[in-house]
Image: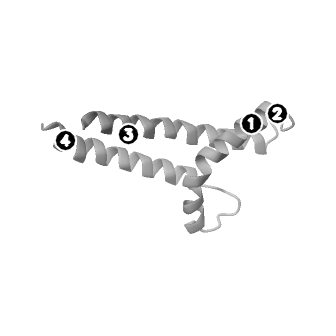
Amino acid sequence: MTALFNVILIALELYTYVIIASAIFSWLYAFNIVNSNNQIINSIGRVLYNLTEPALRPIRRFMPDLGGIDISPVILLLLIIFIRQIIIINILPMVSGF
């Protein structure tokens, strides 16, 4: 059972990196630092969007309008950190028997 929770923790950590990469990519795209006509750049953007948008959409629905500032990735990262801490502090000690 401990192995299952370790896999969940690794998946949450990897998803954290995907969220950060998506936020950085959106900034690069918005400020025209990357070439938006490049097919590889568009493919990377679509993949990052498809990976993060299902988790960010419900957060954006409840967030008030902040004038063009999107803090939903920060809220999602805080939620992931909270879930990881619950698993590490509360669930893993019960499962492993320590």
Which quadrant holds the C terminus? top left
Write down the residue under mark 1: 43
Which quadrant holds the N terminus? top left
Residue at 33% over, 34% down: 6
Residue at 40% over, 46% down: 81
* Image-quadrant location for residue 88: top left
Q: Disc 1 vs disc 3: Cβ atoms closer than 8 Å?
A: no
What element does badge 2 sit on? helix
Q: Which mark is residue 39?
A: 2
Q: CA distance from mark 2 to mark 4?
A: 47 Å
Residue at 30% over, 45% down: 87
Q: CA distance from mark 3 to mark 4?
A: 14 Å
Q: Disc 1 vs disc 4: Cβ atoms closer than 8 Å?
A: no
Mark 2 vs 4, N-terminal side: 2
Q: Disc 2 vs disc 3: Cβ atoms closer than 8 Å?
A: no
**Would you say 78 lies left or right of 50 here?**
left
Write down the residue under mark 3: 8
Q: Position of residue 67 (x, y in %)?
A: 70, 63
Up-down relation of residue 30 to residue 56 (above or below)? above
Q: Amino acid at mark 2?
A: Gln
What element does badge 4 sit on? helix
Up-down relation of residue 32 to residue 68 (above or below)? above
| Other residues around mark 4 within 10 Å, as few (<14) / some (14–19) / many (≥20) | few
Q: Position of residue 66 (x, y in %)?
A: 65, 64
Q: Which mark is residue 95?
A: 4
Q: Amino acid at mark 4?
A: Val
Mark 1 vs 4, N-terminal side: 1
**Would you say 29 lies left or right of 59 here?**
right
Q: Disc 1 vs disc 2: Cβ atoms closer than 8 Å?
A: yes
Q: Amino acid at mark 1?
A: Ser
What element does badge 3 sit on? helix
Mark 3 vs 4, N-terminal side: 3
